[in-house]
Image: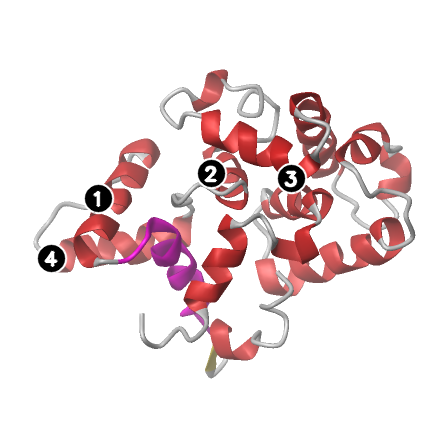
Amino acid sequence: MGKVSGLREHCERCLRTERWGGSVVLMIVDAAFTSIGLNYFTAVVPKVEEFSRVFVETGRLTRLRDLANADVEELMAVWRNRRSLMVAKEVAAYLSTVSGDDREALRSWARRASIENWREDPVGRIRGVGLVTFQYLRMMGGVDTVMPDKIVKRVLNEILVKAGLHPVNDDVEFVRRVEWMASVCGYRPIELCWMTWLIQPEGKRMRMEKYAPILPKI
């Protein structure tokens, strides 16, 4: 963990729902774009930045209700994947019914959402929202947990095996195991999660080093 300078600050920003300058619209867009499995730093982040320039910074889409009511054809000028745009719109539509304050809407939903019953959750029922996206949204809503994506599972299961424990394949069970792992090693689940992403090499450098200039934004 010592290799990942600034990790704690990054996680704190996520848990305070302050990523992307505090724009909940951009957090939802980030999660939706990430849901289709493209490289986060080279594909998703530049497109979220473009989305911000075109729609958020111009005042066109500043609230969740704006995103919910947006014309998907206009949004496709920035992002061509219709399915993930619909995920963003439908998540925004639901959250905008939770509270008139976007930040409180995301945080209120995240506090109440249960991983065990995630498929019955109003967000979990949205087509295109899997458990990874569900957990990512909860993290940005202030819940200290972990996303069971393939990189996180590979790295943390390797740690379990080295500790003489069995790897965990079931996603919900994996989340609970990592939450336990964090409690015994003195770190938070969200820190273990982000650590696994940021220590990944790209070329000859770790992501944490390579993308250091943009991490304070995201």
Verify whether residue 198 appears in magenta. Answer: yes
**Separation of marks 3 and 4 at Cα, in angstroms:** 39 Å
Q: Which residues are magenta?
A: 187-201
**Residue highlighted by disc 1:** 180
Three-letter amino acid code at the position of disc 1: Trp
Q: CA distance from mark 2 to mark 1?
A: 16 Å
Frontmost of labels 1 and 4 is 1
- Please determine whether, in this image, residue 114 is positioned above or below residue 66: above
* Three-letter code, disc 3: Arg
Mark carried by residue 163: 4
Among numbered discs 3 and 2, the one appearing first in the sequence: 3
Which residue, given by chain and number where applicable, does mark 2 sit on?
135
**Does any portion of residue 202 appear in the rendered image?**
no
Q: Nearer the viewer, mark 3 or mark 1?
A: 3
SS of the residue at dot 2? helix
* Callout 3–callout 4 Cβ contact below 8 Å: no
Please give the name of the residue rendered at 58% of the width and 68% of the height, measured from the top-left corner: 215
Residue at the image position 40 percent from the left and 73 percent from the top: 4
- Mark closest to the chain's N terminus, 3 or 4: 3
Q: Crowding near pointer 3: few (<14 within 10 Å), some, many (20+)?
A: many
In the depicted view, which residue is nearer to us: 106 or 82? 106
Q: List x then y, in percent, for residue 118.
A: 45, 23
- Residue 64 in picture, x, y percent from top left: 75, 34
Q: Earlier in the sequence, mark 1 or mark 4?
A: 4
CA–CA distance in space, label 1 to label 4: 14 Å
Q: Which numbered dot is residue 103?
A: 3
Q: In which image quadrant can residue 86 be found? A: top right
